[in-house]
């Protein structure tokens, strides 16, 4: 998998050389390239923004640098196998399902907006050429797309076959298919008693059936309490 990041702050992506992502890069699972959008400007000030047409506060990212960067980094021919991600508070929700879909693609280009955002024609052009995902991490606004791109990267790359040491751990996580899309149950390890707080007895019973039921019950309870939007009558009825 090749990952490209287009940003006026490419240094954000230096962190990808650390921890698991660094290992993936070393193993050849993932190739990471960060690009400074200002390298595709031609004026002394390396300008990437301008005032919004129609008025309004703030500045908008000009389309020209993006177009020239696309030409050089991706190419000038349409290719739907290239996935272009625009992190944006006005995007569709980024979910574990989207992460799974992206974990099987060969190439992802992250376009990190700043200021008030990117001239919309950049997104329209990208849609005419590649497979575009305008995605939001949640209902809040960041100063730019870089932090969201890092979060999306981690969620996607950890699902790439060969990345996680124990792929079974993926099956039991929140939102995974093995959990019916429910939240993960509470986790415990030794010591059995800690500051007057004990591990639930059932988890020390060695009775696998009872343990599995407790975990399922906890997942349903937590999901009902915290994310009623994720529970449906089927799940509740199945339990
Ligand atoms: N909510 C988001 O994903 C986001 C991306 C950029 N700013 O906010």
Image: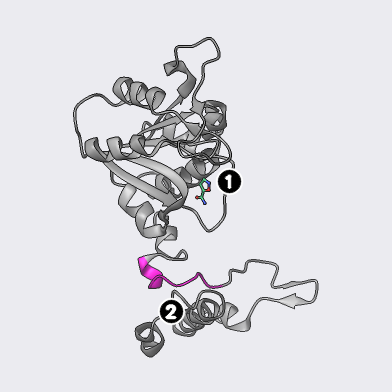
**Residue 161 in sight in this render:** no
Where is 128 relative to 38, above or below?
Answer: below
The image position of residue 150, as x and y in percent, is 50, 41
> Which residue is disc 1 drawn over?
142
**Residue count near mark 1 (Cα–Cα under 10 Å), binned few <14, some 14–19, many ≥20:** few
Q: Nearer the viewer, residue 54 or 94?
A: 54
Nearer the observer, 10 or 14: 10
Queried whether the magenta region covers residue 189, the answer comes back as no
Ligand 1 is within 8 Å of the C-beta of the residue at disc 1: yes
Residue furthest to the bottom? 237
Q: Secondary structure at mark 2?
A: loop
- Position of the N terminus, as image quadrant, is top left
Across and down, in percent, residue 65 comes to: 41, 23
- Screen quadrant of the C terminus: bottom left
Residue at 53%, 35% in the rendered image: 114
Q: Residue at x 23, y 38 (%)?
A: 128
The residue indicated by pointer 2 is 231
Q: Which mark is residue 173?
A: none
Identify which residue is drawn at 37% across, 90% down: 237
- Judged by its main secondary structure, the magenta piece is loop
Q: Is residue 181 magenta?
A: yes
Compared across the picture, whether 188 is left or right of 88 comes to right
Residue at figure coordinates x 53%, y 82% from the top left: 221
Residue 17 image offset from top left, x and y in percent? 52, 31
The picture places residue 131, in percent across and down from the top left corner, at 26, 42
**In the rendered view, does 127 fall on the left or right side of 214?**
left
**Which comes before the other along the chain, label 1 or label 2?**
1
Q: Is residue 87 visible?
A: yes
What residue occupies the far top of the structure in this picture?
Answer: 44
Magenta residue span = 177-185
């Amino acid at each position: 998998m090749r990952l490209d990041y287009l940003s006026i702050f490419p240094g954000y992506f230096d962190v990808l050389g650390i921890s698991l992502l660094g290992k993936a890069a070393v193993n050849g699972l993932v190739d990471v390239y960060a690009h400074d959008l200002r390298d595709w400007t031609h004026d002394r000030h390396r300008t990437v923004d301008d005032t919004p047409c129609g008025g309004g506060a703030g500045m908008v990212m000009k389309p020209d640098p993006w177009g020239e960067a696309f030409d050089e980094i991706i190419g000038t021919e349409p290719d739907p196998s290239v996935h272009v991600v625009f992190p944006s508070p006005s995007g569709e929700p980024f979910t574990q399902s989207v992460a799974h879909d992206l974990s099987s693609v060969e190439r992802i280009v992250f376009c990190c907006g700043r200021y008030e955002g990117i001239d919309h024609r950049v997104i329209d052009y990208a849609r005419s050429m590649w497979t575009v995902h305008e995605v939001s991490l949640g209902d809040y606004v960041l100063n730019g797309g870089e932090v969201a791109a890092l979060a999306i990267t981690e969620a996607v790359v950890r699902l790439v076959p060969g990345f996680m040491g124990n792929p079974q751990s993926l099956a039991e996580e929140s939102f995974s298919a093995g959990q019916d899309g429910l939240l993960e149950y509470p986790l415990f390890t030794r010591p059995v008693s800690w500051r007057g707080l004990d591990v639930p007895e059932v988890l020390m019973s060695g009775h696998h059936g009872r343990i599995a039921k407790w975990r399922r019950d906890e997942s349903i309870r937590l999901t009902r309490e915290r994310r009623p939007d994720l529970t449906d009558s089927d799940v509740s009825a199945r339990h």
